[in-house]
Image: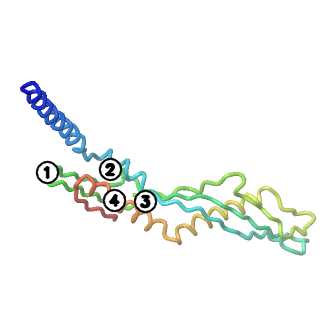
Amino acid sequence: MLKNIMTIGLAVVVGFGAMYAYGRFFDDSRQTRVTVNSIKKIAESAAIEYNMSVIKEQTKKKKFIEWKDAKFLVLLTGKIRGSVDLNNATVRIDKEKKTVDIKFRKNAVKISNPEIGPDDIKIITVSDPNIFHKLNDRDRNKGQTAAIKLLRQSVLDKGIVQQTKNQATLVLQNFLAALDYKSSISFL
């Protein structure tokens, strides 16, 4: 009987010791440090991505003896990404008050150049009536450049800059709230 009581007592002591050690282990791991690097990594993940297509009609003007303009279409599909650059921000962390203040400067939102693969560009000749002044690669390159500008402008018109700001604010606020920090995030 005494042996059973001592065994139970020892089991209770070991159990409480294990629970204490287990609790200390997890309590220490929850005390995550909020650093500029951790905020930077989260801010990089807050991105907006557009996959868009545009059709740009190009005209090659006729020359002296030619009778009609040449025309072709550029069909372009590309991916454009909007993200924030924490290098263009001021970050203040108050660990005692558990607050983070992030102020993004004017150029903090970065819009990438379109990612375009070789299969994402199609050029369709509508008319090439002139014998001496045919459409060539230079004309097609000009058309492609104009289509890329149109694609980028379309994404800007759709509000990628504001959507990127909203996404970054939401992601950063949620990240900091999960660590029990209050945040103030603003864009100039």
What residue is shown at x 77% (from left), y 70% (from top)?
A: 59
Q: Are marks 2 and 4 in contact (CB under 8 Å)?
A: no
Q: CA distance from mark 4 to mark 1?
A: 23 Å
Earlier sequence position, callout 2 versus callout 1: 2
Q: Which mark is residue 96?
A: 1
Which amino acid type is shown beneath numbered disc 3?
Answer: Val
Which amino acid type is shown beneath numbered disc 4?
Answer: Phe
Foreground label between 4 and 1: 1
Q: Are marks 4 and 3 in contact (CB under 8 Å)?
A: yes
Question: Mark 4 highlights which residue?
Answer: 104
Give neighbour class at mark 1: few <14, some 14-19, many 20+ (Cα, 10 Å): few
Which amino acid type is shown beneath numbered disc 2?
Answer: Ile
Q: Horizontal and vertical percent for residue 140? A: 76, 60
SS class, disc 1? loop
Foreground label between 3 and 2: 2
Earlier sequence position, callout 4 versus callout 1: 1
Foreground label between 2 and 4: 2
Left or right: residue 67 versus residue 49 is right
Q: CA distance from mark 1 to mark 3?
A: 30 Å
Left or right: residue 124 versus residue 81 is right
Return the residue nearer the eye: 70 or 96: 96
What residue is shown at x 48% (from left), y 60% (from top)?
A: 48
What residue is shown at x 13% (from left), y 27% (from top)?
A: 7
Question: Mark 3 highlights which residue?
Answer: 109
Return the residue nearer the eye: 57 or 20: 20
Question: Mark 2 highlights which residue?
Answer: 39
Q: Are marks 1 and 3 in contact (CB under 8 Å)?
A: no
What residue is shown at x 90% (from left), y 69% (from top)?
A: 129
Return the residue nearer the eye: 127 or 185: 185
Which amino acid type is shown beneath numbered disc 1?
Answer: Glu
Earlier sequence position, callout 3 versus callout 2: 2
